[in-house]
Image: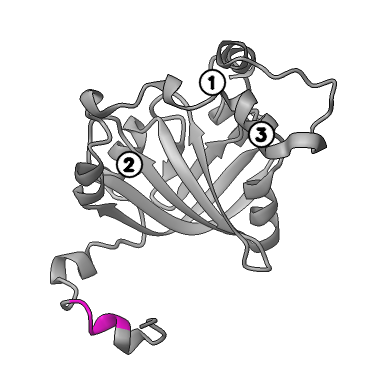
Amino acid sequence: MNITTLEALRALYDPVRERSAKKELPQLDVHATRFIGLSPLVVLSSAGPNGALDASPRGGEPGFVKVLDPQTLLIPDAPGNNRLDTLENIVQTGQIGLLFLVPGMDETLRVNGSALLTTDEADRERSADARRVPKLVIRVTVRASYLHCAKALMRSALWDASRHVARSVMPSMGEMLRDQIGERMSAEAPVETQEQMLERYRQTL
């Protein structure tokens, strides 16, 4: 049976616990700020005007996302594949959801709000790292912030090294793209080995 109403959905679950309902804050507190300062990875969720969704990981040194104040975050844009899915969505809808992760910590931090793209010199300088000053910065206005419980990462054992999968169990990225793109891929484009791809990536990190 498909669930098509909120009433039918809620009937499957116990009422939300008071602590879970009240933990959402309209700004970043000291704990959220500290969490962001420790995080080297954030997943950005966005949506286009036609409802198409996108989730994109962004990484850097711990604290690469800057907290200006309890309502404002700066996320530097680093070189990528130039599809610009997230950036185009932000231009068109101005909405964003963030999930921060800290290696070794099973809790995560969720932040939702509005976003805009800026080339403001001060924001770009604040977001610079040892490699570069970013072309642009995603400026986020925080609307909601809350710590997410550890259950998902505990179930996945994400940080357990004994559960990590050897890269060799999958073909290289170049081989998979060749299979996926097939004849649409330029005949002049060589199929990279995994080592070649990683070395190319290192040049533009």
Circle nearer the N terminus (1, 2) = 2
Task: Tell me what residue is drawn at x 48 percent, y 31 percent.
Answer: 59
Residue 111, x across and y down, in percent: 40, 53
What residue is shown with label 1? Answer: 129
Residue 75, x across and y down, in percent: 53, 39
What residue is shown with label 2? Answer: 33
Left or right placement of residue 134 versus residue 18 in this view: right
- Secondary element under disc 1, as helix, strand or loop, is loop
Task: Tell me what residue is drawn at x 15 percent, y 65 percent.
Answer: 19
Let me know if residue 181 appears in the view.
Answer: yes
What residue is shown with label 3? Answer: 179
Left or right placement of residue 38 versus residue 171 in this view: left
Q: Inspect the magenta stretch and tell me whether residue 11 lies in it.
A: yes
Q: Nearer the viewer, mark 1 or mark 3?
A: 3
Tag 1–tag 2 contact (CB < 8 Å): no
Residue 80, x across and y down, in percent: 64, 31
Please name the amino acid that badge 3 sits on: Asp
Residue 104, x across and y down, in percent: 23, 30
Structural crowding at the residue carrying mark 1, measured as other residues with C-alpha within 10 Å and reported as few (<14), some (14–19) or many (≥20): some
**Which secondary structure type mostly characterizes the magenta part of the structure?**
loop
Q: Quadrant of the C terminus?
A: top right
Structural crowding at the residue carrying mark 3, measured as other residues with C-alpha within 10 Å and reported as few (<14), some (14–19) or many (≥20): few
Please name the amino acid that badge 1 sits on: Asp
Left or right placement of residue 202 versus residue 31 in this view: right
Task: Tell me what residue is drawn at x 32 percent, y 48 percent.
Answer: 109
**Label 3 to label 2, Cα distance in Å?**
43 Å
Tag 3–tag 2 contact (CB < 8 Å): no
Q: Inspect the magenta stretch and tell me whether residue 185 lies in it.
A: no
Instruction: Using the image, tell me which numbered label, if any, was put on residue 166.
Output: none
Give the magenta part as a residue range. Answer: 9-13
